[in-house]
Image (cartoon, coloured by chain):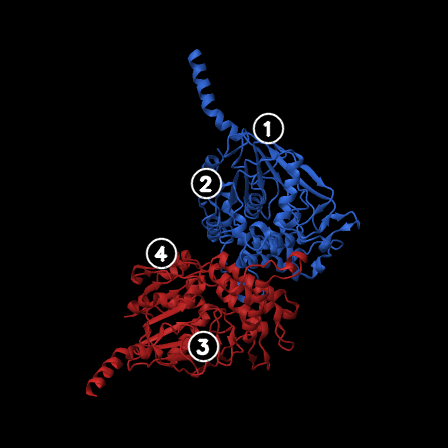
Chain colours: A red, B blue
Amino acid sequence: MTALCRVLAALFLLLSPLLSYGEILLVQKQAFEIADFTTQSGKTISPVRVGWEAYGTLNADKSNAILITHFFSGTSHAAGKYQPEDAVVGYWDAIIGPGKAIDTNKFYVISVDTLVNANVFDPNVITTGPATINPATGKPWGLSFPVVTIADFVEVQRQLLDSLGIQKLHAVIGASMGSFQAIEWAVRYPERVERLIPVIGSAYLDAWAAVRLERWAYPIKQDPAWRDGNYYEHGQPRQGLTTAVAYITQDALYPTAFNQRYPAPASAAAPHQDIRAPFSAWQQLMTQAAERSKLQDANHILYLVRASQLYRAGMGDNWQQALQQVKAKTLFLPASGDQLLLPTMSQHSAAAMPQAAQVQYAEIPGDYGHLDGVFNIQAVSAKIAAFLN
Amino acid sequence: MTALCRVLAALFLLLSPLLSYGEILLVQKQAFEIADFTTQSGKTISPVRVGWEAYGTLNADKSNAILITHFFSGTSHAAGKYQPEDAVVGYWDAIIGPGKAIDTNKFYVISVDTLVNANVFDPNVITTGPATINPATGKPWGLSFPVVTIADFVEVQRQLLDSLGIQKLHAVIGASMGSFQAIEWAVRYPERVERLIPVIGSAYLDAWAAVRLERWAYPIKQDPAWRDGNYYEHGQPRQGLTTAVAYITQDALYPTAFNQRYPAPASAAAPHQDIRAPFSAWQQLMTQAAERSKLQDANHILYLVRASQLYRAGMGDNWQQALQQVKAKTLFLPASGDQLLLPTMSQHSAAAMPQAAQVQYAEIPGDYGHLDGVFNIQAVSAKIAAFLN
């Protein structure tokens, strides 16, 4: 009996780290409000409300905070579940949690919904944008909502951290549009950011990527149901919004993963007989996009496109010069197969960083292209863990 | 004097091959008509008329013909000029001509406008498609024009070659959509094709690329001025057609070349102040696309998209099996930076070729991506020359 107990105890000790991986990290959405927020372009939004969530515990001297900044179609739900029965976990659950690369036993990990978040009708998202009721008029802001920038997203986060008394960030980590915010943090607040990890990211958006993003906006603007942004009484411009989401999906996926998900145009008779007949891959893509876009707002997509298009580190005329402000130790993690923000963009950004940034660079492998920065992030979890410790 | 003459003569001999490069190859457009053409789907087009041109001289036993099949936005104008004062030469003039890789001192090089050619209003293009007057009705075919396929393009070319008494082709060479035709030639007429060079090509179109192409068609179909294809009395759906051409332009260019041509979104005030304000790169792209699309027809773009989407070698259920018919010695030449028809598509196609094809493979370097197959073809001219000889 004693021997058996000893064996069981040893087994338990051996398995306990694994058990912690299996634990469900339960998280709660919280709201942060700014009564009057002034945008980079000098306009006022009253009020700004955004959602945020945190994993782990803030230590006594508030020195263990890591900020996660989210991507274009993302939300602040970076890890864990709201309820044990939730079907899915937060998007970077593979690397955020107890014993994981971003170890919530050590770090207080915090994540904030951006302004103009795409998923405004998701009950777990709190954001302010064109779909929000403007208290001054009692109606949705629509296109009277000011153009907002990556710098505005950062300023909202900064005010939240100030309110929590967090002065230093152990790290800022973000994927894609989240990398813009992360880099902007390190440029604007070099004394507050100790480490920086731009994942599938860049310190600037080039003409090629800006045009790619404009192609997401185009079907919305061309949809008569968009009504120049004043559709809230009539319902979303469904066709345009669905098409935008379909294009975002394709642009974020390398062909290998895309082709596994969608079949090649079949030998079906219809597309051979009628030029108007759609083919199956297109239909499936659009059907899934329609489903995914149900919690999204068309104007919010337009505002996210614009915020991304206008991004350059420092938001001035010379992003390379702006990067010279950075004091954070930096790890660039592009995805090898990325066809949206190409690894060369990370390389050019890395090349412009100052000596102080001690830049490291590694590529994320995989079949997903841009989305390897989300779906295959565990491939670089050891690199992230080593960099943070 | 005699010594000077000898030096001059030696210099002349030395320079004469260079002089032949500087020669202007003057070419003439010719027309070929088929009274009743039956499409792959069993419909009849009466008549089919297409343009063609040739460079070099057909030898006595008609054994020195090389067929060039053109790409999506291309025409049969592969080399030379129509008039000495023409501003530009044919698209592959760098490799077709006297003393060049495809040496017109040795070969009779022939090129044919496809059915539904995009540039139907170019006075140097002869094609049959939706914009053509259907003699049976006295009106443009519009969408009553049957869906045509890569196999139909090949059959038109085959009937032209039959009429010229050309039974064997020394080679079939084509870029992009031209590679589909070239491969289809080698599959359907293995005894007639001795050599095959698919440039930036593939033996099949996958779901990813088919959706990419559908995105070219979409702005046309969404333009109210398209009128379900019946716009000929009212004028082209300009906005949709221009947008399609802009998208084609971007998808065919690697970001490096694109960014050299179009500036990054500037710090201009307008896009920061108004979500509807366009940025300069987009405006420039659209302005140039509007110019380029002036000689094009919107319906023809839709038909070319469909023909490309439906392509698989042999046009049946199993393109890999169809490739087993090929007897031509084959050289695949994808472009390293191609983000439209990726080098992996050439690799998969090459891997499915039979032993008899003695497949060779080399990549075209450059900054243009897909269009390196056109703009940078001289980078592989030695490979092409060696392969043909």
Residue occupying the point 57% across, 36% down: B169
Residue nearest the observer in this picture, A299 or A109: A109
Q: Chain of mark 2?
A: B
Residue occupying the point 44% across, 11% down: B2
- Residue A55 on image: x %, y %: 37, 79
Say whether residue B352 is left or right of residue B246: left
Q: How many residues crowd mark 4 within 10 Å: few (<14), some (14–19), many (20+)? A: few
Q: Spot the residue most to the right.
A: B137
Q: Spot the residue most to the left.
A: A2
Q: CA distance from mark 3 to mark 1?
A: 70 Å
User: Which amino acid is tagged 4?
Assistant: Ala
Contact (Cβ within 8 Å) of mark 4 with mark 2: no
Residue linked to disc 3: A88
Say whether residue B190 is left or right of residue A356: right
Residue linked to disc 1: B61
Q: Secondary structure at mark 4?
A: helix
Closer to the eye: label 3 or 4: 3
